[in-house]
């Protein structure tokens, strides 16, 4: 889905959502052999479930939020707590600002450490821990042990990011 927020009104008449499983089912027959009762949605290239209806594409997690709460999340993000983009169980979804949503990211690929917030600092020949906060980067220290550096990151993440802290 693009950055455009599309109105969700009316989807409750054509879709049934199971909050315990995160799955959607059509309530009406659809073109091209899709019948009422068939599962709705497909996984896109980025791993999110999308549902096409009336020539529009919707992110399933946004529909789930709307169908459960009756409120369109509009400019707010819907965060997948466990980072699994296709897991649309309602217990796995929460409203978040863009910054809160960004805090809940997994460890980046191709970094030197197996832990989030840690990388090998060649100049000092030690593990460096750091965390992004308020548009900048906070240096947490240099460590002989990779895991000790990660613990420093975890403590800082809890303090600075609260419930949106992700330890990778």
Image (cartoon, rainbow, N blue to C red):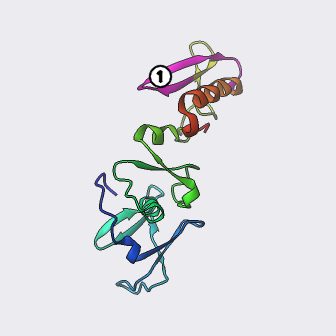
138 magenta-colored: yes
> In the depicted view, which residue is nearer to us: 111 or 129?
129
78 magenta-colored: no
Magenta span main SS: strand
| Residue 19 drawn above or below residue 146 | below
Residues drawn in magenta:
130-146
Neighbours of disc 1 within 10 Å: few (<14), some (14-19), many (20+): few
User: Would residue 129 be visible to someone looking at this image?
Assistant: yes
Quarter holding the C terminus is top right
Image x and y of residue 84, in percent: 55, 54
Image x and y of residue 19, in percent: 55, 66
- At 54% from the left and 37% from the top, the residue drawn is 110
Q: Which residue is mark 1?
A: 137
Corner quadrant of residue 14:
bottom left
Q: Does 49 sit left or right of 166 as displayed?
A: left
Judged from the image, the secondary structure of the residue bearing numbered disc 1 is: strand
- At 44% from the left and 81% from the top, the residue drawn is 27
Quarter holding the N terminus is bottom left
User: Would residue 107 be visible to someone looking at this image?
Assistant: no
Image x and y of residue 137, in percent: 47, 22
């Amino acid at each position: 889905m693009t950055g455009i927020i599309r109105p969700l009104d009316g989807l409750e008449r054509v879709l049934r959502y199971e909050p315990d499983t995160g799955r959607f089912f059509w309530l009406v027959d659809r073109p091209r052999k899709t019948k009422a009762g068939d599962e709705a949605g497909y996984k896109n290239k980025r791993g999110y479930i999308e549902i096409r209806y009336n020539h529009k594409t919707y992110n399933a997690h946004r529909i789930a939020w709307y169908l459960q709460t009756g409120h369109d999340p509009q400019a707010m993000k819907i965060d997948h707590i466990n980072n699994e983009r296709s897991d649309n169980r309602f217990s796995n979804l929460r409203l978040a600002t863009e910054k809160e949503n960004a805090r809940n990211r997994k460890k980046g690929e191709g970094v030197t450490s197996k832990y989030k917030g840690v990388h090998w600092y060649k100049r000092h020949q030690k593990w460096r821990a750091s965390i992004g906060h308020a548009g900048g980067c906070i240096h947490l220290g240099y460590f002989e042990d990779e895991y000790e550096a990660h613990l420093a990151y975890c403590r800082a993440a809890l303090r600075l990011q609260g419930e949106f802290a992700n330890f990778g």
